[in-house]
C-alpha cells in the first residue's frame, strides 16, 4: 500500500503535473498538495532524483518567474502587473 506522498511521487515521475492536476488525482485540496511538495522533493533527492519545477509564467507578457523559491502562487506579474498566470508544472526526474 503506497502512502499519499509515494502516490504523489509516482504521478510526478510519470510526467509533469500542476498542483490542480495532482489535487484532482489524489482527491486533496490544492493547499494540501502544495504542503506535501517540499517533502516529496526531499524524498526524491534522497533517491538521487530531483523535483523539477517549470515555473509560473505570465500569460499576458510572457514573464517567467524562474528565480522564485516559494511554491505559493504570486499575486501578479512584476512586469505588466496582470494576474493572469500559467500554473507551474512539477516533475520528478
Image (spheres, grey):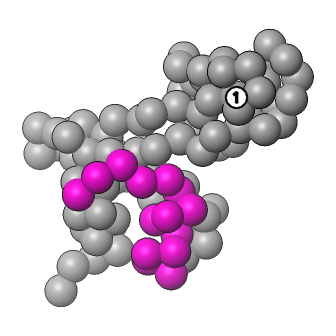
Rendering coords of residue 8 (x, y %): 33, 65
Q: Is residue 1 above or below residue 88?
A: below
Residue on which disc 1 sits? 58
**Residue found at the far right of this picture:** 81
**Residue found at the far front of this picture:** 60
Rendering coords of residue 56 (x, y %): 60, 33
Rendering coords of residue 2 (x, y %): 21, 79
Along the line of sight, the residue nearer the viewer: 66 or 72:
66
Instruction: Give the side of residue 15 with respect to residue 82, left or right.
Output: left
Q: Is residue 2 above or below residue 90?
A: below
Instruction: Give the side of residue 79 with respect to residue 45, left or right.
Output: right
In this view of the protein, can residue 19 be seen by the observer?
yes
Instruction: Give the side of residue 59 with respect to residue 34, left or right.
Output: right
**Residue found at the far bottom of this picture:** 1
Magenta span contains residue 66? no
Check the picture and name the quadrant holding the C terminus: top left
Rendering coords of residue 24 (x, y %): 52, 74
State which quadrant residue 52 falls in.
top left
Residue bounds of the magenta highlight:
14-27
Amino acid at each position: 500500500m503506497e502512502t499519499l506522498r509515494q502516490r504523489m511521487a509516482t504521478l510526478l515521475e510519470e510526467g509533469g503535473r500542476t498542483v490542480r492536476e495532482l489535487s484532482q488525482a489524489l482527491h486533496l485540496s490544492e493547499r494540501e498538495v502544495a504542503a506535501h511538495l517540499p517533502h516529496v522533493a526531499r524524498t526524491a533527492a534522497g533517491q538521487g532524483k530531483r523535483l523539477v519545477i517549470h515555473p509560473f509564467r505570465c500569460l499576458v507578457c510572457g514573464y517567467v518567474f524562474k528565480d522564485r523559491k516559494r511554491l505559493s502562487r504570486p499575486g501578479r506579474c512584476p512586469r505588466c502587473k496582470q494576474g493572469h498566470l500559467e500554473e507551474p508544472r512539477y516533475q520528478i526526474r
